[in-house]
Image (spheres, coloured by chain):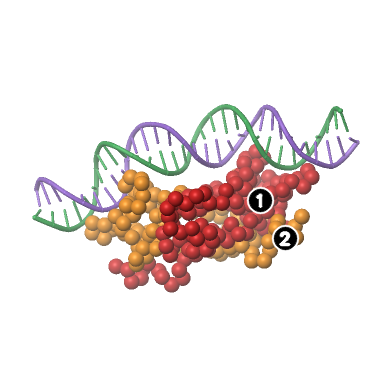
Chain colours: A orange, B red, C purple, D green
Amino acid sequence: MSNLELPVLGQDEAVACCSPMVREPLGEAAATDLARMFKALSDPVRLRLLSLIASHEGGEACVCDLTGPFDVSQPTISHHLKVLREAGLVDSERRGTWVYYWVLPAALARLSSLLEAPTGAVPGAGAAR
Amino acid sequence: MSNLELPVLGQDEAVACCSPMVREPLGEAAATDLARMFKALSDPVRLRLLSLIASHEGGEACVCDLTGPFDVSQPTISHHLKVLREAGLVDSERRGTWVYYWVLPAALARLSSLLEAPTGAVPGAGAAR
DNA sequence: CGGCTGTATCGACATCTGTCGATACAGGAC
DNA sequence: GTCCTGTATCGACAGATGTCGATACAGCCG
């Protein structure tokens, strides 16, 4: 599975935090790890769940606040929340009857900085070709 | 492609460019549109392809530069490139024998800013509860 | 205690996704 | 023109994913 030599990029740092993927090629391990997070974001319901949680009063939301706005069943919401949690994007805690979820900002920040485009170096649009 | 018609949902601007999803809930249409982009990023091969293209000399890469580093077949690479293109993350052009791909920085920037976390407002750990 | 409500898990199902080999298409070389 | 190389499309397949209803678990209330 390991391809040829990729001297660049020890995947550790790319995984770690902040080198944009537009600067140097992602390694296999880093790509696998990041793909798992992006996959968690690749569903409209999960995207809206995450947004609802993050923008909720106090930065956290009870599951009871999350089932209302969607057309899908309660087990489906629960499943999506589990996917988000296992991707490391949110965490949760039971408090008495209710379970609360909140976003882990570091995870979002990691993905955000990874996607940062080089401000000036526009390729196809500009000089290229 | 751009966005489809927005039936309901308040935030056209969320689709447009830059309001982080942690500030206000995403609408259905915005979430569907964004999920399509994140889905394109949810595969390790595509993530590495995108990274390879973006970090390549001149900001663009020939397909012939992209088939080498992977263990998958050429049709599979072609398929992944198509997915990235249809998600609006890259564009391509044929120049004689070869086909070149480059990243569309605006698309990455849109996703990046969407994921930006509010730097200070940490939820579960802080004042909540 | 028993009953009630909120949440998670289970099992099943249809659909989507990644992959391949075979093949078609585009363009340069001869 | 014919051949060759680079890329895309096609058809098929196994496995993953989103969804549901049924059910189990957790904790409050009376």
Q: Give the quadrant of the C terminus of chain A.
A: bottom right
Q: Give the quadrant of the N terminus of chain A.
A: top right
Res A40 seen here: no
In space, the residues marked 2 and 1 are separated at their CA atoms by 13 Å
Chain for mark 1? B
Tell me if mark 1 has few (under 14), some (14-19) or many (20+) residues whose alpha carbon lies within 10 angstroms of its own: some
Specify whether A75 is left or right of B65. left
The residue drawn where x is 66% and y is 51% is: B91
**SS type, badge 2:** loop
- Whether marks 2 and 1 lie on the same chain: no
The residue where tag 1 is placed is: B91
Q: Is residue A51 above or below residue A76?
A: below
Specify whether A88 is left or right of A35. left
The residue drawn where x is 33% and y is 45% is: A73
Q: Amino acid at mark 2?
A: Gly
Specify whether A43 is left or right of C2. right
Q: Amino acid at mark 1?
A: Asp
The residue drawn where x is 64% and y is 52% is: B90
Name the disc covering residue B70, or none. Answer: none
Return the x and y of residue B23 as percentages of the image width and height. Answer: 43, 65
